[in-house]
Amino acid sequence: MKRVLVTGGTGFLGYHLVKKLKAQGYDVYALGRNPDKGELLRKQGINFVRLSLQDADGLSRCCKGMDFVIHCGALSSPWGRYKDFYESNVTGTKNMVDACIKNNVGRLVHVSTPSIYFCYDSRLDVKENDPVPLKMVNHYAHTKYLAEKEVDKAFSKGLPVITVRPRAIFGEGDNAIIPRLIKANEKRGVPLIHRGAVLTDVTYVENVADALVLCLNADKSCLGEKYNITNGEPMPLIHILEMLFHALACPMREIRVPYRAVFYMAGLMELVHRYILTGREPLLTRYSVSVLAKDQTLNIEKAKRDLGYSPSISVKEGIQRFAKWYGEHEEGK
């Protein structure tokens, strides 16, 4: 039985992943900081270790005897202090790769982000080797880019690694993307720029988990490579929203807003919240506004060809699954 360690095992993606790995017969160890979710995992026969990515010695002990490590743990947010992002995403990743090297782990799969491609402009069919902007859009993108560099250095030292860049993950347990849209709809309405015609890619969480499992047994020619992961169904944002609110049996309220005015307003909000309101996250950021206004789709042909990746759950089915979970979750509150 192969042993696999998953960081961020109590997070959104990691929680789905460790259960999938367990179902496929792996001896799974989940690292995380949420003791309640950790206890739920233990009841399902999954080993849980409550540990921070800043604990280098603890990570080294956990990596002993591991065949694989999947590094999902990260600080993912459009807003926050650079120091916090750096400690989690860069220092945490460096600690992880050092632990893998020290313990001769067979393979490290690193979860990165396509946010590193984003440049406040439309980009379609982005490939893994396309240029990235000289300046990243936020602290999250910047520190995840630096984390990739740490993984690349580890590969140059002989550590077998594969990096994946999944875009806009959604599904059961999501507490970021879709819930924010639902709350916006309840309060004022969903802000739509260009009437929601922006072309976008999203990825159902189980498809991302499938891609990560494929990486464990991918051919050695994949080592050192980067892979985009999406559902492979680029579509206008308005279509995704219509499917979502239809599945929720809830009318969607649209607020049509002009891009340029809202973009500059978001920039002002960032300044006020950074220097006057002690760093609290503003209602809008330039990044979040641009996501609603600019096309961005990824090319996933490389993952299909090299990893055998084929999304098994469509966007529509994924949204229906989320809506069912969300309804049950809200009723249980």
Image: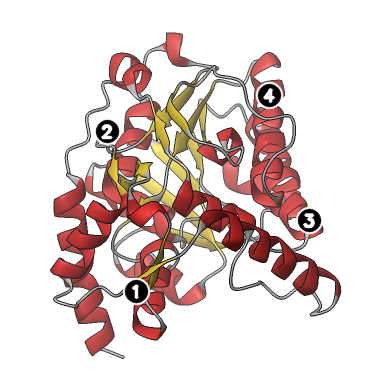
* Of labels 3 and 4, the one closer to you: 3
The part of the image, by quadrant, that contains residue 166 is: top left
Say the numbered circle drawn on residue 232.
2
Disc 1 or 2, which lies upstream in sequence?
A: 1
In the image, 198 versus 313, the foreground residue is: 198
* Of labels 4 and 2, the one closer to you: 2
Measure the C-alpha gap from mark 3 to mark 2: 32 Å
Disc 4 or 2, which lies upstream in sequence?
A: 4
Q: Are marks 3 and 4 in contact (CB under 8 Å)?
A: no
Residue type at mark 4? Answer: Ala
* Residue 26 visible to the viewer: no
Report the residue marked by disc 3. Answer: 82
Q: Position of residue 312 (x, y in %)?
A: 17, 38
As displayed, is residue 213 above or below residue 319? above
Q: Residue at x 43, y 71 (%)?
A: 180
Say the numbered circle drawn on residue 317.
none
Say the numbered circle drawn on residue 182.
1
Q: Position of residue 205 (x, y in %)?
A: 32, 50
Label 3 Cα neighbours within 10 Å, binned few <14 / some 14-19 / many ≥20: few
Label 2 Cα neighbours within 10 Å, binned few <14 / some 14-19 / many ≥20: some
Disc 1 or 4, which lies upstream in sequence?
A: 4
As displayed, is residue 328 above or below residue 173? below
The image shows a total of numbered marks equal to: 4
Report the residue marked by disc 4. Answer: 154
Measure the C-alpha gap from mark 1 to mark 4: 41 Å
Disc 3 or 2, which lies upstream in sequence?
A: 3
Label 4 Cα neighbours within 10 Å, binned few <14 / some 14-19 / many ≥20: many
Outermost right residue? 275
Q: Position of residue 174 (x, y in %)?
A: 37, 64
